[in-house]
Image: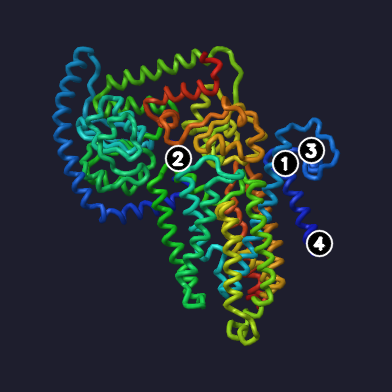
Amino acid sequence: MKKRWLQKALGAALSLSLVLAAGCGSAGQESTAAESAAAESTAAESMAAESTAAESTAAESTAAGAEETQYPLTITDDLGTSVTIEAEPERVVSLSPANTETLFALGAGEMVVGRTDYCNYPPEAADVPSIGTYTSPNTELVISMEPDVIFASDYIDDSIRSQVEEAGAKVIVFAASDLEGVEKNIQLAGQVLNRNEEAAALVEGMEAEMAELEEILSAGHEEKSAFIDLGGYYSAGPGSLLGNMLEDIGVRNVAAETGEMWPQLSVETIIESNPDVYISLYSTPEELRQVAGLSELACIQSDDTLIFYDGLSPEADRIQRAGPRLAEGTRLLAEQVYPELFQ
Amino acid sequence: MVLAIAGCLLLVYLCTVLGAASISLGEVNRILLHEIFHLPVSLEGIPSGSIAIIRDVRLPRVILGFLTGASLAVCGASYQGIFQNPMADPYILGISSGAALGAALGIVLHFSGGFAGLSGTTFLAFAGALLTVFLVYAISRAGRRVPISSLLLSGIAVNQSLSAFLSLMMLFNQQSMDQILFWTMGSLNGKGWNQILIILPYAAVGIFLLLTSARELDIMLMGEETAVQLGVQVERVKKKVMVVSSIVTAAVVSATGIIGFVGLLVPHVVRLFTGPRHRVLMPVSLVFGGTFLILCDTVARSAITQEIPVGIITAACGGPFFLYLLRKSRRGGEGR
């Protein structure tokens, strides 16, 4: 959850955008009605697809002897909220790109009736109607999709949450900030949706990928240090997804000293700590090379050590989304920081 | 006067010594003597990182802080003079929102490269600020006169609508939202000689022009009609002060982002000591505004291991300090 600090620090600005979104509600009513009609028709289709899918899963699971979820099921989400799911969900809404990836990876894509504007993976997700952005979803749209379960991120506003819960949806918040947490949430989602087997396979795949990575990294190498630049010299410190990822691949995080999850470092601190690798998720290499002082750093001068992930690129998504591709993303980052180990 | 300049130079030096990176006093001195004054001092044993920090990061940042603070304070004093309104500050005509909208556009489009070490964002912010002032001015003009009240009202209205556009832009570009917010918080981090180069010509010429208007502003304190009778071309002075202050503020804001409170509070604090006469008020505001921002920025960059946006420091220190002075002067039975 890269941008979580933002909400904490600048709630006022967000609530302003919420006001704006609410203001747009009346103007967009016509389209809302049209979309909900569309949602209903897809619902009918997906229900049909659902029953066949459920049958085949049941057949498979009896063959494999995998466990079925017993409903009602009570789980505890990342905010510590205890949520009881009464029956196997048929319609779910995802309020974050990472959750959408998880749902599709679990083979539950046909159950997803709503997603955010930023859910661009897998490509099939584009066929699902959007409910707006992850910080300010359109509550009316979400409710009109009649979801049984909403997989939210910790961006969800308490007032929106209580409104959709009153409309009968169960809200589960996923806010993992490390690989372990992501795997736990995948299993949890699998349990909620009765996709236990798929979840187990998914987690196994991620574990295998991480084991392979660890094996490669365990070959003797010198520890490198890195500075993550999220833009404007804001960085990801300990406890953040990227901060934990650096820890996992044995990279010393220059921003860790601050003890803050989203610290801004002064340029002189960055120069003084002279990191081996500079990871930029916003500023382009050309821009960074024009910053006086910073341009003197060896890691800025070389293309090998100035790693740039363009904001909305697939690579940036892979390392920043707390979803099933996180292991892949971890490997991607490791390959770029320690290229010598992957030859 | 000489004393003030010496004091400022001493402060620039002291704040260059202080900072997050630990570089010893002796090293700082040697770097300054060698790199700035080109004296034959050996730099042996000093890591190249330290040299870059002092030469390219810390010293320019301190100088930029003085320039920014001084410009904002003088512009604030001038605006308060022509508007004859204690709430006036350099952003009152919507410059800040215009610049923010321009900057947001630059951030969303995110051109890479830029020119002379300045990003496209800076240029768009500058253009946005100037366009906004022009718009406000054009709206409120009535014939050859520009009534103050309609200027203030249209300034507020334009400010509000541009803020709404900014929010809308952030809503539709959430991936850029944090960048836009950093920009609006204002910071001197990562800024140096390039920014000084764009601000300096505007600030130097602009502040000079504003200081030459001090006498007319003093006469206008007695009321516009009296000033007209005394031979002051009130409309011309107002236009001149407004155009000059707007351009200076636009240059500063586009380079540093929105740094609040300096332009509003510094002239008030100074007025408590010097009285309302602009011939004293404006030069003292210049010095005090500059030193105030240097001090705030030094706290912002070295108080803790992470940066604090300097706008937070100026507001947090400036607000209570001003209230204290205000209360003290009221108790004394005088003050404005």
Q: Is residue A186 left or right of residue B85?
A: left
Q: Quadrant of residue B166?
A: bottom left
Quadrant housing the N terminus of chain B: bottom right
Residue type indicated by callout 3: Glu
Subunit of label 3? B
Q: Residue B27, labelled with which disc?
A: 3
Residue type indicated by callout 2: Lys
Residue type indicated by callout 4: Leu
Mark 1 or 3: in front is 1
Q: Residue B3, labelled with which disc?
A: 4
Mark 1 or 2: in front is 1
Q: Earlier in the sequence, mark 1 or mark 4?
A: 4
Task: Same chain for labels 1 and 2? Say yes or no.
Answer: no
CB atoms of marks 4 and 3 within 8 Å: no
- Residue with the mark numbered 2: A3
Q: Secondary structure at mark 3?
A: helix
Q: Is residue B159 visible?
A: yes
Residue B286 coordinates in the image, percent (x, y):
69, 63
Q: Secondary structure at mark 4?
A: helix
Task: Same chain for labels 4 and 2? Say yes or no.
Answer: no
Residue B241 coordinates in the image, percent (x, y):
60, 70
User: What residue is at 65 percent from the left and 80 percent from the top?
Assistant: B219
